[in-house]
Amino acid sequence: MTQLGINLPSLIIYLVNFGILLAVLYVLAYKPLLRAIDQRAERIRDSLAAADRARDEAASSQAAIEDQLNEARREGQRLLDQAKEASDRFREEEMERARQEATSFVERARVDIQRERDAAIAEVRVGFGDLAITAAERVIRRSLDRQAHEELISQVLEESGNNLRQG
């Protein structure tokens, strides 16, 4: 082997040195490096799991928020519907009250008109009675011939027309 340029004792020493170096590197570098890589891989797995949990929580929170928003929209719509119903009810009640007031006003007006009509008729009756009494007095004072009777009627009608126009 010496002919090939290989010295056997040197080769053995090199191999022993390489083995010692390999053992030292294994103990001092490879194991800590593997441990660091394993730790980093574990941290990455934990981070990924935490990210998955956070994503799941975010999705569930978003779903919960959307549910709350939908519930709030439904509640708002319900409140709007209630307010509309209340306003419709109020409008109907006010319209009914206005109708009742109008009916009451018309009925009072009818009663007032009837009372005034009755008063006017009573006044006309009193006036007519007075007129009849006046006519009778004049008839009695005069003779009862046909021409005097016609003149008397004309005179009484004229006076009654003047009294009605004045009153």
Image (cartoon, rainbow, N blue to C red):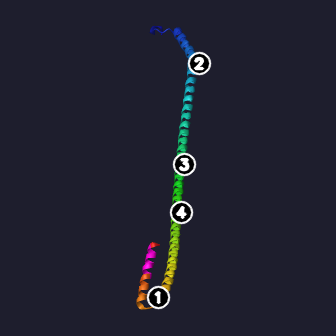
Residue denoted by label 1: 142
| In front: label 4 or label 1 | 1
Span shown in magenta: 156-165
Mark 3: few/some/many CA within 10 Å (<14, 14-19, 20+):
few
Residue denoted by label 2: 27
Q: CA distance from mark 2 to mark 3?
A: 64 Å
Residue at 52% from the left image edge and 8% from the top image edge: 10
Label 2: which secondary element = helix
Q: CA distance from mark 4 to mark 1?
A: 66 Å
Label 1: which secondary element = loop
Residue 71's disc number:
3
Residue 97's disc number:
4
Upstream in sequence: badge 2 or badge 3: 2
Q: CA distance from mark 1 to mark 3?
A: 104 Å
Q: Is residue 88 above or below residue 34?
A: below
Label 4: which secondary element = helix
Mark 4: few/some/many CA within 10 Å (<14, 14-19, 20+):
few
